[in-house]
């Protein structure tokens, strides 16, 4: 599968979910599979398993579907030996050709005890994957900065940036060039009241504003220290969330596509537990995007 093939397979819209779909609980396997099957029926082109996910999380989703691409977003390089990661990719690609995308990333210093020289570690990890026979077209990188975006262009099928703006997406497209897949994540609050919507957004955003990888990226791209205080300024919240009525949300998603995204990974934020499967919201979103 080439980057072009992957673009066609994932389409323009996918679902990012870091809770309910990331389950290895055998008692939830049927529920998770049914949710993935419905996402496929709704017309989404990809499911991105958020958080610290791996190939085993993808298996029940792949087995319950026939078309949709399932990607890790992301699999931490610190927790999976590259030889094992390469073997698992090969197994899943043989069983479900062209439908498993191995999203890789360096995670965060607060979440990984081994965190040292993340860029150099990522390069070494890609070297080991190459040596183990894992194809570059089967992987995507969680890239924010220019150097990692260049790695996504040169040594992967593309980039899956998390928590970025449309303006940052345009810069990423310029660095990547036309061919690699660019699939940013975008959080969606299906709420029209500004106060309610921004409160839900800030409650969810707060954990990320304690992670320097994200805050440094914001500061690099025109935001100020004031923008990342107290849960985020209105300017920051409005840039990294789509909220409002159907017209406003559709317009925000289109901003990312117009900026150069090939695909947008949409994450529902509704204030519910992170392990929930927000099926009603996924249905509303699919109708909105149709």
Image (cartoon, grey):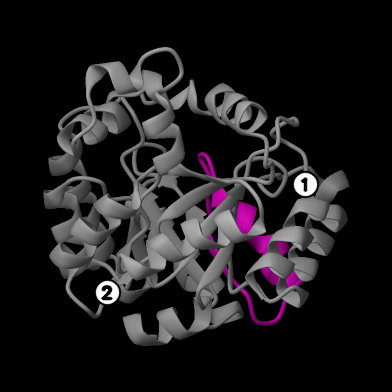
Disc with the residue nearer the chain's start (2 vs 1)? 2
Question: Going by the image, does 27 lie left or right of 289?
Answer: right
Dot 2: what SS?
loop
Q: Position of residue 27 (x, y in %)?
A: 88, 45
Q: Is residue 257 magenta?
A: no
Dot 1: what SS?
loop
The region drawn magenta spans 48-71
Quadrant containing the C terminus in the rendered view:
bottom right
| Residue at x-position 38% and y-position 33% | 236
Q: Position of residue 54 (x, y in %)?
A: 52, 50
Question: Going by the image, does 54 lie left or right of 214?
Answer: right
Cα distance in 3D space between marks 2 and 1: 30 Å
Is 270 rendered above or below residue 53?
above
Mark 1 crowd level (few <14, some 14–19, many ≥20, 10 Å Cα)? some
| Residue at x-position 39% and y-position 22% | 209
Instruction: Provide the residue designation for mark 2.
Output: 180
Which of 69 and 265 lies nearest the eye of the viewer? Answer: 265
Mark 2 crowd level (few <14, some 14–19, many ≥20, 10 Å Cα)? many
Do we see residue 106 in this rendering? yes
Q: Position of residue 100 (x, y in %)?
A: 52, 70
Do we see residue 110 in this rendering? no
Instruction: Provide the residue designation for mark 1.
Output: 277
Q: Quadrant of residue 259?
A: bottom left
Which of 67 and 232 lies nearest the eye of the viewer? Answer: 232
Q: Position of residue 71 (x, y in %)?
A: 52, 61
| Residue at x-position 28% and y-position 16% | 226
């Amino acid at each position: 599968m080439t980057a072009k093939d992957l673009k066609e397979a994932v389409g323009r819209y996918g679902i990012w979910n870091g809770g309910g779909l990331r389950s290895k609980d055998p008692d939830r396997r049927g529920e998770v599979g049914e949710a993935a099957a419905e996402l496929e029926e709704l017309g989404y082109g990809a499911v991105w398993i958020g958080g610290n996910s791996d190939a085993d999380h993808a298996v029940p989703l792949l087995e319950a579907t026939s078309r949709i691409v399932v990607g890790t977003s992301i699999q931490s390089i610190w927790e999976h030996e590259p030889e094992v990661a390469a073997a698992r990719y090969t197994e899943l690609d043989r069983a479900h050709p062209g439908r498993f995308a191995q999203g890789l990333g360096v995670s965060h210093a607060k979440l990984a005890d081994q965190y040292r020289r993340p860029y150099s570690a990522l390069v070494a990890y890609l070297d080991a994957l190459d040596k183990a026979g894992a194809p570059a077209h089967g992987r995507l990188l969680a890239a924010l900065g220019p150097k990692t975006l260049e790695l996504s262009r040169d040594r992967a099928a593309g980039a899956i940036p998390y928590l970025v703006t449309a303006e940052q997406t345009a810069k990423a497209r310029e660095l990547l060039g036309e061919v690699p897949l660019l699939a940013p994540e975008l959080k969606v609050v299906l709420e029209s009241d500004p106060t309610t919507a921004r409160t839900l957004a800030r409650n969810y955003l707060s954990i990320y504003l304690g992670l320097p990888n994200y805050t440094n990226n914001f500061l690099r791209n025109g935001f100020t220290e004031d923008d990342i205080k107290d849960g985020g300024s209105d300017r920051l919240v409005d840039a990294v969330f789509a909220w409002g009525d159907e017209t406003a949300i559709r317009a925000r998603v289109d901003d990312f596509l117009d900026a150069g995204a090939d695909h947008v990974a949409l994450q529902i934020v509704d204030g519910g537990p992170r392990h929930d499967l927000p099926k009603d919201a996924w249905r509303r979103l699919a109708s909105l995007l149709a």
